[in-house]
Amino acid sequence: MKNQRFRRGMVLALYLWKLQERRKYMEKERDIDALAGERWFPKESSIEDDMKELWGDWGVCSEVEKLKDVLMHRPGKEIENFDWRAARFRDEIDPEKFRAQHDALADVYRSHGARVHYVEDVPANRPNALFCRDLVFMTPEGAIVTRPATESRRGEERYAAKKLAELGIPIIRTVCGGATFEGAMAMWIDRRTVVLASGVRTNREGYEMVEAELKRMGVTDILHMQIPYGHAHIDGLLNMASHDVAMIHASQVPYDVCDALKRKGIKLLECPSRVEAKEKLAINFVALEPGLIVMPSGCPRSQELLEKNGIKVIPLCVDEILKGFGAMHCCSAFLKRG
């Protein structure tokens, strides 16, 4: 009898222990751990800080730092049998010569260490599509995709945006609504300074849209430049050859812009020939690095002046491309400098 009572007692004790453990387990199940708040705190960084790790090595805040990546469009069927007057060219072109000169420019970039990326699949009715500077304005945070002013170019930006996406470059702004803005209407002087223009290729709405983006990313000195009637963009009137040397078409650049640049210690070289400035587009050069530029050949007076002021010049024949009222700077959307 004693053994039976002992066994019954043990069974009962074991049952009670299991019941107690089960209650503890059920209590634990009902008591869900609180969500830790700290794990949801954001990473305090800018897209500029994250660029290289998450997007790639992209960004521009200079016209002269070492050129590493450039966006271009190799002319295709769109330059064959097109209405050159409707496209606002100066004259008929030789398509093969036109392409050869564009290829030569791309080769200069490659020979100096830059990677050339091409916009592709451009419609056959867009002969101006090689002028990629107008389609993209690059910043330290990513690209601003533009909205060209002229009907003959409207929509080209779609194909530039497609290439930017393929490369993994963040598009921080697409000019929209009734705004117009072309990339050659803005020019970096340094990380805090940009010349931003309004005129026939950029209306007030477009200007303010880009101005707001630049201010948001820390640009403190925005130098407004009104493009004179009869001119299109900044880069036919003003361009940087090194950190402290610029060339200007003196009678066409506003005093306030010149004064602001001089106060920043920039020496202004006045293009000595109206023909070289207006017809040969001597100012439409591209800096490969500080103090080294590739510029249109056939501009001896401008080249001499630049070289006397310590700028090394690579002259390149682009006389066929000039028939489209553009030269090397117009052909090139910089994606990475420095």
Image (spheres, grey):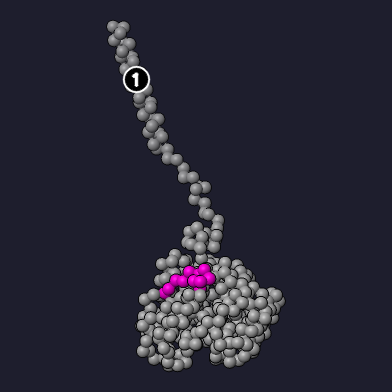
Q: In this view, does 69 lie to the left or right of 120?
A: right
Residue 135's place in the image compared with 337, above or below, is below
Residue 6's place in the image compared with 164, above or below, is above
* Residue drawn at (59%, 79%) of the image: 313
Q: What residue type is labelled 1?
A: Leu
For the record, the magenta segment spans: 109-119
x%, y% of residue 74? 42, 78
x%, y% of residue 278? 56, 90
Q: In which quarter of the image is residue 252?
A: bottom right
As helix, strand or loop, the secondary structure at mark 1 comes to: helix
Q: In this view, does 245 lie to the left or right of 330?
A: right
* Residue drawn at (38%, 30%) of the image: 23
Quadrant of the image for the C terminus? Answer: bottom right
Q: Nearer the viewer, residue 23 or 262?
A: 262
Q: Which of 49 and 210 is in front in this view?
A: 49
Looking at this view, name the residue that lies furthest to the top: 1
* Residue drawn at (40%, 30%) of the image: 24
Q: In this view, does 26 lie to the left or right of 208?
A: left
Q: Is residue 142 visible?
A: yes
x%, y% of residue 183? 51, 78
Quadrant of the image for the N terminus? Answer: top left
Q: Can residue 253 be seen in this view?
A: no
Q: In which quarter of the image is residue 4?
A: top left
Identify the residue under disc 1.
Answer: 14
Tally of marks: 1
Residue 306 belongs to magenta span = no
Q: Quadrant of residue 165?
A: bottom left
x%, y% of residue 333? 50, 75
